[in-house]
Amino acid sequence: MDCFLTHVIKNTLASCDYSNCNQLCMNYIMSVAYQCPIVFNNEVYKELWESLFDICINNNELSIPMIDGH
C-alpha cells in the first residue's frame, strides 16, 4: 500500500461514496489503519475518516436492513 498522505486521501475519496457507505470504503480505511498507522493518525486524515464513519453510521441507520447474523 502506498502510504503517502496525499495518495491515501485521494484513494479514500475514490473508495468512499458520501451518499452510500459501502464495504469497499470501510475496508480501505481499515487497511490504512493497519498498514499506514502514521497516516491514519495524521490530524487531516483522522478528520476525514471520522467524518466518513459519521456519515456511514447515519446512512446505515436509514438504509441498511437488519442483519440476521448469517
Image: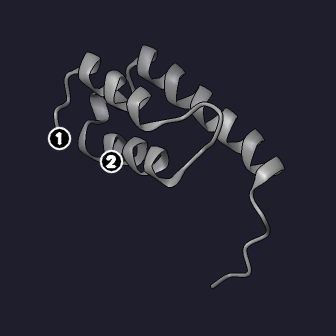
Q: Which is more N-terminal, label 2 or label 1?
A: 1
Query: What residue is pinned by disc 1?
Result: 1
- Residue at image location 40% in from the left, 47% down from the top: 30
Compared to 44, does 7 lie above or below?
A: below
The crowding category of the residue bearing disc 2, from other C-alpha atoms within 10 Å (few below 14, some 14 to 19, many at least 20), is: some
Relative depth, front residue between 28 and 16: 16
| Residue found farthest to the bottom | 70
- Residue at image location 37% in from the left, 44% down from the top: 28
x and y percentages locating residue 21 in the rendered image: 60, 44
- Residue at image location 20% in from the left, 30% down from the top: 3
Type of amino acid under label 2: Ser
Type of amino acid under label 1: Met
x and y percentages locating residue 1 in the rendered image: 17, 41
Query: What residue is pinned by disc 2?
Result: 31
Q: Is residue 31 left or right of residue 15?
A: left
x and y percentages locating residue 13 in the rendered image: 43, 27
Residue 70, numbered label = none
Q: In this view, does 13 lie to the left or right of 7?
A: right
Would you say the residues marked 1 and 2 are in contact, meaning their CB atoms lie under 8 Å apart?
yes
